[in-house]
């Protein structure tokens, strides 16, 4: 019998991901910018992932779409929210996960789950850019540094400069004043990471946060944020090898359930 | 579903203004029966969700309903109104009353003081305030609000409430099936219709739906509580995503559907029934509100609760965490939504509602 191919597609506000799952595990994945056309992004990331393993669409058994653009993926047989999918994906990677912190491009969420990977509660911030990947992008521009270098640089600072304003626009001008006052770039970056992490921590406090914690979303690639979160939560925090694909992985797992008649 | 609006419009033979002077109101603690007994036509003030004119006076972090209302007032208000009766439910509402008198100078305006506690003395006090409202209306509009007229108005309003109760029992019938969002739309039609015509239309709808076979709705059962919703779009979204809303305990939903019991003194009966109706978070006794909601959960078999608070609505925002904790203790999950007054549902709200329903299907279903 041929191996089943189960696909999860996560159309986020900034990036889109596709994960191809086989019966034995992840076969391939791809990450692309969403851009202005979520539907085209869905096509593109699926094609890229298929090309990596030399398969075509005919091989696919089932597709589940997730993310804010999930309703724009016409070829998916089911749409599920990123909340349910992040929980499932994180539970697959780290079965002892009971809390997921997802920091995406334009929102952030904290999800609690049970031993089976099912969501028990969640809280979501999608009202303001503070506490999201977008906040870091704006600050990287203000500091004339690369986003990917921010994590490493912040770990070089002994302390962070307190950032008082958490509004993206005001924090940007605060950062510019701090540069003018002569603070080190590394200390400012560390201060920004601490400010974002505190915001996430306060939001998480509305839920019953339990160990273990898993991070997901692009911002989890920033070690500085991960360290700041660890210091606040004082709990074990797992970071997946590729945190951006956790939602798409969860969707692929639900696609597999559906194909096997479990969904 | 048969178009309720169609039935109602066919019955309306004259514009609302010809049914007597129109009195604008905002709070469901106002016994409309008193107005109706004086031949006055109540009209619920639900302003369009725009507030451009108000933006110069109130920052965006003020209650969006008050902002929209002030916007309406600054734009000239409602020319067809002969008066307004508002309640001092919150600071925003009190100041709206002031602004309304200042900018629109309605010929009749009355601010009804609503107690927060429910005790024998507050009941007596509320009854006195209703007496005062009745006398002011009589003096200004040169009408007599007799005991007989009050009794008749209460009976007619009781009929509305019992007809809505009957409609609730017909949910799931018809094609498309009658759901809670339709009930909310029907209630909204009632806010701008003469009561007798509204009742007649309700009776016709009940008659049309009753022969349909009972058709149970299958989704997870949900109770929705909270403040004021502009339109029914949030409830409709929940129902589209296959949740079954069993109760809409909202200021604009079916919060008060009990009949005013038989009485010898109509004003006393009204003050007692209205002050004791299922509580709004603005009232004092949170524990009593929690007990009401728990009772509704066991009566309806609801599996979960959606808590909706209008942005910056202090009474509800302060209550939400207490209620969430009390319900989680008895195994009822709670989704908290803080919303705009726009009549539209944002992508973020859709994601929250859908995720909550997915959670119920997987874990609690």
Image (cartoon, rainbow, N blue to C red):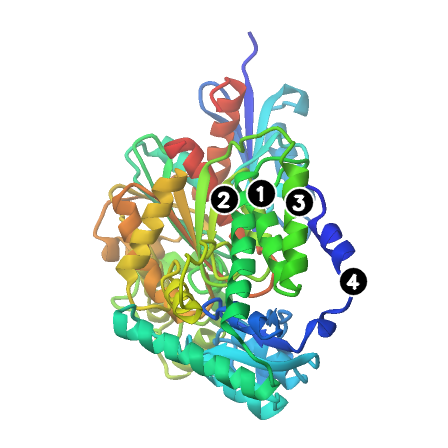
| Residue at 64% over, 50% down | B202
Instruction: Find disc 4 in the rendering and name its residue.
Output: B13
Marks counted in the figure total 4
- The chain carrying label 4 is B
Labels 1 and 2: the sequence-earlier one: 1
Dots 1, 2 in contact, CB < 8 A? yes
Answer with the quarter of the image where residue B356 lies: top left
User: Does B351 sit above or below residue B63?
Assistant: above
Residue B156: horizontal and vertical position, in percent?
Answer: 56, 59
SS for tag 2? strand
Work out whether mark 4 precedes mark 1 in sequence or the reverse, and give the earlier one. Answer: 4
Residue highlighted by disc 3 = B205
Numbered label attached to residue B245: 2
- Label pair 3/1, CB-CB below 8 angstroms: no
The answer as to whether the residues below labels 4 and 2 share one chain is: yes
Secondary structure at badge 1 equals: loop
In what quadrant of the picture does the N terminus of chain B appear?
Answer: top right
Disc 2 crowd, CA 10 A, few/some/many (<14, 14-19, 20+) = many
- B249 or B137, which lies in front? B137
Q: Position of residue A193 (x, y in %)?
A: 36, 63
Q: Which residue is mark 1?
A: B179
Please determine whether, in this image, residue B247 is positioned above or below residue B309. Answer: above
Same chain assignment for discs 1 and 2:
yes
Left or right: residue A156 compared with residue B89: left
Counting residues from the start of the chain, the first of labels 3 and 4 encountered is 4
- Count residues near mark 4 (Cα–Cα under 10 Å), then give few for <14, some for 14-19, many for 20+: few
What is the CA distance from the residue labelled 3 to the residue labelled 1?
14 Å
Disc 4, SS: loop
Tell me: B194 left or right of A155.
right
């Amino acid at each position: 019998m041929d191996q089943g191919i189960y696909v999860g597609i996560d159309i986020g506000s900034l990036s889109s991901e596709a994960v191809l799952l086989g019966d034995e595990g992840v076969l391939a994945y791809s990450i692309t910018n969403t851009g202005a056309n979520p539907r085209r992004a869905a096509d593109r990331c699926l094609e890229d992932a298929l090309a990596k393993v030399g398969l075509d669409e005919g091989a696919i058994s089932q597709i589940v779409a997730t993310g804010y653009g999930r309703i724009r993926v016409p070829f998916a047989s089911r749409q599920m929210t990123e909340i349910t999918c992040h929980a499932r994906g994180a539970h697959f990677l780290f079965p002892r996960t009971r809390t997921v912190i997802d920091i995406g491009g334009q929102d952030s969420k904290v999800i609690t789950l049970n031993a089976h990977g099912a969501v028990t509660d969640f809280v979501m911030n999608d009202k303001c850019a503070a506490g999201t990947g977008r906040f870091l992008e704006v600050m990287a521009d203000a500091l004339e540094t690369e986003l990917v270098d921010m994590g490493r640089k912040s770990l070089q600072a002994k302390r962070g400069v307190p950032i008082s304003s958490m509004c993206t626009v005001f924090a940007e001008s605060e950062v510019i004043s701090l540069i003018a006052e002569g603070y080190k770039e590394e200390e400012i970056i560390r201060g920004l990471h601490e400010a974002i992490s505190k915001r996430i921590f306060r939001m998480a406090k509305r839920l019953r946060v339990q160990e273990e914690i898993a991070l997901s979303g692009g911002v989890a690639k920033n070690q500085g944020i991960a360290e700041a979160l660890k210091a606040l939560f004082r709990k074990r925090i797992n970071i997946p090898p590729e945190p951006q694909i956790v939602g798409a992985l969860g969707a692929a797992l639900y696609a597999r359930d559906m194909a096997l008649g479990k969904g | 579903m048969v178009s309720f609006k169609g039935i109602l419009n066919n019955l309306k033979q004259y514009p609302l203004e010809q049914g007597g002077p129109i009195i604008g109101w905002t709070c469901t603690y106002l016994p409309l029966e008193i107005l109706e007994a004086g031949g006055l036509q109540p009209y619920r003030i639900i302003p369009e969700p725009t507030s451009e004119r108000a933006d110069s006076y109130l920052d965006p972090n003020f209650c969006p309903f008050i902002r929209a209302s002030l916007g309406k007032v600054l734009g000239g208000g409602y020319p067809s109104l002969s008066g307004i009766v508002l309640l001092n439910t919150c600071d925003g509402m009190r100041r709206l009353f002031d602004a309304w008198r200042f900018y629109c100078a309605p010929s009749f305006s009355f601010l009804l003081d609503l107690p927060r506690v429910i005790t024998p003395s507050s009941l007596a006090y509320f009854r006195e305030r209703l007496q005062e409202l009745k006398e002011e209306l009589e003096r200004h509009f040169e009408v007599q609000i007799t005991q007989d007229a009050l009794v008749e108005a209460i009976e007619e309003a009781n009929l509305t409430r019992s007809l809505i109760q009957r409609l609730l029992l017909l949910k799931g019938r018809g094609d498309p099936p009658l759901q809670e969002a339709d009930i909310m739309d029907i209630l909204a039609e009632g806010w701008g219709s003469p009561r007798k015509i509204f009742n007649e239309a309700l009776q016709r709808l009940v008659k049309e739906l009753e022969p349909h076979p009972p058709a149970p709705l299958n989704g997870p059962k949900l109770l929705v509580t909270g403040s004021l919703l502009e339109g029914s779009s949030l409830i409709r979204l929940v129902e589209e995503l296959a949740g079954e809303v069993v109760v809409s305990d909202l200021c604009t939903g079916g919060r008060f559907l009990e009949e005013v019991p038989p009485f010898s003194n109509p004003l006393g009966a009204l003050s007692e029934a209205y002050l004791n109706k299922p509580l709004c978070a603005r009232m004092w006794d949170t524990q009593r509100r929690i007990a009401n909601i728990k009772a509704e959960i066991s009566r309806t078999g609801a599996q979960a609760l959606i808590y909706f608070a209008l942005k910056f609505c202090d009474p509800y925002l302060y209550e939400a965490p207490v209620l969430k904790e009390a319900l989680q203790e008895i195994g009822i999950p709670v989704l908290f939504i803080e919303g705009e007054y726009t009549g539209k549902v944002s992508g973020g709200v859709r994601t929250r509602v859908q995720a909550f329903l997915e959670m119920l299907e997987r874990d609690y279903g």
